[in-house]
Image (spheres, rainbow, N blue to C red):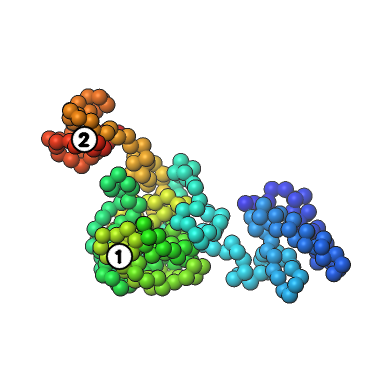
Amino acid sequence: MRFNNIHYIAGIIFLLINISTATAEDSQYVQEEVKQVKIAASMTGDFLKEVFRGEDPQIIPFDIVEIEEVVYDHPAHDIYGLWINERVNPYNVAIRDIGDSIFIDLTGYVHPVEEGVVTSHYGPRRGRFHHGIDLRVRIGQNIYAAFDGRVRVVGFDRHGYGRFVVIRHANGLETLYGHLSRIKVEANEDVKAGDLIGLGGNTGRSTGPHLHFELRYLGNAINPYRLICFVEKKPRMDVYMISPTITYAELIAFRQARYHIVRPGDTLSGIARRYGTTVNRLAQLNNINPNSILRVRQRIRYM
């Protein structure tokens, strides 16, 4: 957030002067002013930071605080604006609100596994949406950071990702590595592309050892195939341009999908007539044969 009101800034500076010259007898009022400055700081892009030395807090401009002390000094802070260690997607940014023609630098990419055949793709899967790519790995196989960045989340999701790591990168992407047997990094730790971050495993909702690998921008998962060639284990281009309607086409289509619940006597031809489509289109949408016999209560996608 940029400053738009010079009088507002002047007010913050005035508070700083008052705090720095306050006596011990004024400590009660100093504490109140500290609170006000912290509120002002949060409204102006974290312009200031409170630093405790002994019992007396000092408020100083962020640019003279050691870099480790600056709470918002994280990769792509200008894009995300917040740093939360608990959730995979705390941003709540809709695809329609992502700007067009956003350029992502893919140079410096390192493939997360030395060997790993793709076993499951991005997209709809048994009524859910699979937000990443699955790569077959051995339990204990090394898993590497894809780009330079900082670890944002180290977590465990028994019904989903199992042991997992989320890393934010300066290019604006966040990468997720799921189903790990062991994690070798900690939250808020800086990593380089190719650094060991964990070991392959079979934790969480998993039917066999594999790495679940995601690429996300502002919390929304991108099809990794659009950016990465998994055969050659390298980016398809140096710079990828995010255009929401193209980049998120599969995810948008899934969210817009509509289904018919099969009733006794239903046929594909009857369902096609009902919804103004064709049998071949229904077969394509549902990955079934046009001559398939339907089951009662089966979900048939028609749009």
Q: In which quarter of the image is residue 177?
A: bottom left
In the image, which is nearer the foreground, mark 1 or mark 2? 2
Image vertical order of residue 4 relative to residue 49, above or below: above
Q: Which mark, residue 291?
A: none
Horizontal side of 169 relative to 2 (left or right) equals left
Q: Is residue 22 left or right of residue 99?
A: right
Task: Give how far across and how far down residue 14 sits, in percent.
Answer: 81, 58
Residue at (22, 24) in percent of width and height = 273
User: Callout 1 environment at 10 Å: few (<14), some (14 to 19), or many (20+)?
Assistant: many
Asked whether residue 298 is in view, the answer is: yes
Q: Earlier along the polypeptide chain: callout 1 or callout 2?
A: 1
Tell me what residue is drawn at x 25 percent, y 63 percent.
208
What's the amino acid at mark 2? Val
For this rendering, which residue is in front, 23 or 21? 23
Q: What residue type is labelled 1?
A: Asn
Image mark count: 2
Kindly identify which residue carries mark 1.
202
x then y, percent, for residue 256: 36, 37
Tell me which corner region of the image, top left, top right, bottom left or bottom right, holds residue 274. top left
Residue drawn at point x = 41 percent, y = 45 percent? 243
Q: Which residue lies furthest to the left in this view?
A: 291
**On screen, 233 above or below 96?**
below
Q: Distance between the residues labelled 1 and 2?
A: 34 Å
Q: Residue, x 34% and y 61% (percent of image)? A: 204
The image position of residue 283, as x and y in percent, is 19, 37
Residue marked by disc 2: 296
Residue 232 is left or right of residue 17, and the answer is left
